[in-house]
Image (cartoon, helix red, strand yellow):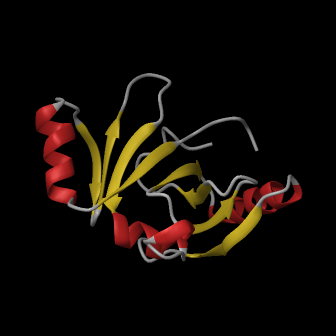
Amino acid sequence: MNPYVSAITLGVRDLAAAKRFYAEGLGWPVSFEQGEWVAFKAGDGSPAIGLFGRDALAADAGVPAEGSGFGGCTLSYLVREDARVAEVLAEAERAGATIVKPAESAPWGGASGYFADPDGYLWKVGSAQGDQSFAE
């Protein structure tokens, strides 16, 4: 797995208010929006910043939204091919990560899964749909 962060997704309690803050308040252009996910391209070489409902993001990772199981954000590592999701999860597990959610078909298309690093930080590994400019 290359040392690269594709997107930082923040679990927010009010998606519309958070979108207004970043888009209107800070002037960040929305680069991609699908369902409950809004992404802002932060700049050349920077990871995308995503917003997703906190409860929905926790459910996507398969962990409780409250308590020690979920810290409010995930880091994302996006790949171009569905099969690569399971490969990256296996690489992370060999490196000492815990698989939180194995690779599976995603409701939006593609595939995704989650691992936790040794400190418990959650990483989503997913196949990019649409704009793949920030995918491995």
Q: Position of residue 40 (x, y in %)?
A: 31, 39
Residue 14 visible, this angle = yes
Q: Quadrant of residue 66?
A: bottom left
Q: Nearer the viewer, residue 61 or 32?
A: 61
Q: Nearer the viewer, residue 69 or 98?
A: 69
Q: Position of residue 60 (x, y in %)?
A: 47, 72
Q: Position of residue 91 (x, y in %)?
A: 82, 55
Q: Residue furthest front?
A: 67
Where 36 sits versus 26, above or below?
below
Q: Quadrant of residue 117?
A: bottom right
Q: Residue at x 41, y 71 (%)?
A: 108
Where 119 sits versus 47, above or below?
below
Q: Nearer the viewer, residue 131 or 75?
A: 75
Where 97 sits versus 41, above or below?
below
Where 108 sits versus 96, above or below?
below
Q: Position of residue 79 (x, y in %)?
A: 61, 51
